[in-house]
Amino acid sequence: MTDARVTPVVIGIAGGSGSGKTTVVRRLTASLGDAHVSVLEHDRYYRDRSDLRLEERAALNYDHPDSLETDLLVEHVRALRARQAVEAPQYDFARHNRLEASDVIAPRAAIIVEGILIFADKALRELMDVKVFVDADDDTRFIRRLQRDIAERGRTVQSVIDQYLGTVKPMHLEFVEPSKRYADIIVPQGGHNDVAIEMLLTLARGLVARG
């Protein structure tokens, strides 16, 4: 499982905002073991827009593929597959800006790539051994996003609603939902489908064990 000669297994976890992706990632990490898993979240890679004022940054469309530096994520996944550590960017969601600091991500037996738009990029998809789409109904996803953005990102109720109606929902319909066709596995009911998740965990353990 830790043989440096073995190419890591890359598992993509996609799905709409609030679908339960983080829950699935946590279940996978716990099942495989922290020492054997590297996680790269796509939303670390929002472009640096420090050239704009806070109010201008807040008005940007963060749910369009162009808002993310996906080329850098592709570069990092390739490096991890080659057993090279990477410096993943950090992002401040309250101020809508990339930080100067970065996190060193070490190569491990399994690389989990997570994000709403990871299946929308062909180069990124082609690096994945398993592509999982976490599905949930729109109401559930909106409520989860509302709770998260208020509790963790310092947003107001109205700002979350405005962003959801203005960009999140339209971009979900244009980019996220269509990307589901690329998935190898679809997990209905978000992160609470124990049967589907257990099947995924069994598959992931087998892939990592085979190396």
Image (cartoon, grey):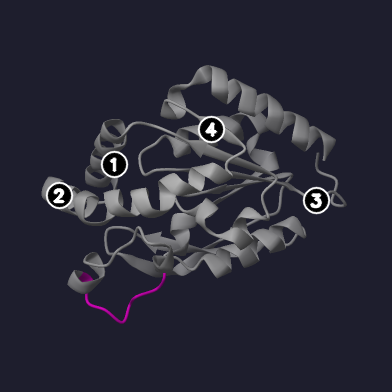
Q: Earlier in the sequence, mark 4 or mark 1?
A: 1
Q: Position of residue 207 (x, y in %)?
A: 76, 35
| Frontmost residue, 4 versus 120 | 120
Is residue 151 found left or right of 193 in the rendered image? Answer: left
Figure check: 105 above or below 47: above
Residue for point 71% across, 48% down? 108
| Frontmost residue, 74 versus 181 | 181
Gap between marks 3 and 4 measured at Cα: 25 Å
- Element marked by disc 4: strand
Residue for point 22% across, 77% down? 53
Gap between marks 4 and 1 measured at Cα: 20 Å
Figure check: 89 above or below 11: below
Give yes or no for contact between labels 1 and 3 (Cβ–Cβ under 8 Å).
Answer: no
- Element marked by disc 3: loop
Q: Which residue is mark 4?
A: 186
- Element marked by disc 2: loop
Q: Which residue is mark 2?
A: 156
Gap between marks 4 and 2 measured at Cα: 32 Å
Is residue 81 found left or right of 60 in the rendered image? Answer: right
Amino acid under disc 4: Ile
